Image: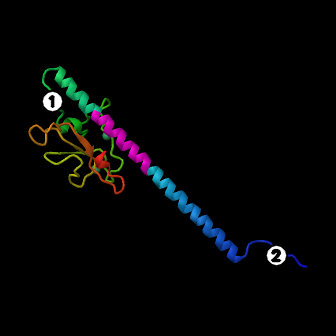
Amino acid sequence: MKKQAEGLSLVELAVVMIVVLILAIGAVTAFQSFLISVKVTAVKQALEQMRRGIKDFYIDQTLQGSPRFPVLEEVSEDSGRSVVMIDGNLPDNPLDTDGDRDNVVEALSEPRGTIIGTTGGWVYRPRESSPGARDAGEIWANTATPGIDENTF
Ligand SMILES: [Ca+2]
Ligand SMILES: [Ca+2]
């Protein structure tokens, strides 16, 4: 009896290609969620550093006898350096998608987590939103990626 020709039939080849395709899609999806988790971690670290810097600024001012939170221009890096960061570099919001990822906009009476405008970056509240609110010095992400909601961090 003659042995069947070696190699894959068209149907077998198609099955192999489908399996490879499914594996590739799985790898891309896993890589994308890895990238997102890196960005989420970076947002949390940036917020932690900025919040610590703002708090330290307030403590410093208090020790000098005139307690106050930094104004927007002192938090922002636009005038050269951010006074709340040791190295003067305000961190980027990695989930900001425009060219300027460390821009800061000012919150007035908006509740914490509110997205203000369309420039992304961060939202900073230099003064209390209402008398006695005790929310001055808050900072949050000015972006709300679906499924992440980093503005609530
Ligand atoms: Ca920066
Ligand atoms: Ca921006």
Please tell me how crowded label 2 is: few (under 14), some (14-19), or many (20+) other residues with Cα within 10 Å: few
Residue 149 visible here: yes
Q: Is 85 on the left-hand or right-hand side of 30?
A: left
Q: Position of residue 103 (x, y in %)?
A: 26, 45
Image quadrant in which the N terminus is located: bottom right
Q: Position of residue 126 (x, y in %)?
A: 16, 38
The stretch in magenta equals: 36-51
Please tell me how crowded label 1 is: few (under 14), some (14-19), or many (20+) other residues with Cα within 10 Å: some
Where is residue 64, by image quadrant? top left
In the displayed structure, would residue 43 be above or below residue 7?
above
Colour scheme employed for the rendering of this structure: rainbow
What amino acid does circle 2 point to?
Ala
Q: Residue at x 69, y 77 (%)?
A: 10
Q: Residue at x 24, y 55 (%)?
A: 118
Report whether the residue tagged 1 is closer than 8 Å to ligand 1.
no
- Disc assigned to residue 5: 2
The reply to whether discs 1 and 2 touch (Cβ–Cβ < 8 Å) is no
Helix, strand or loop status at disc 2: loop
Nearer the observer, 131 or 142: 131
Q: Give the Cα separation between the discs numbered 1 and 2.
A: 84 Å
The residue identified by callout 1 is: 68
Which residue, as the protein is rendered here, is positioned at the far top? Answer: 64
Where is residue 8, by image quadrant? bottom right
Q: Position of residue 80 (x, y in %)?
A: 25, 36
Which residue, as the protein is rendered here, is positioned at the far right? Answer: 1
What amino acid does circle 1 point to?
Arg
Residue 84 visible here: no
Q: Residue at x 22, y 28 (%)?
A: 57
Among numbered discs 1 and 2, the one appearing first in the sequence: 2
Q: Residue at x 15, y 30 (%)?
A: 68
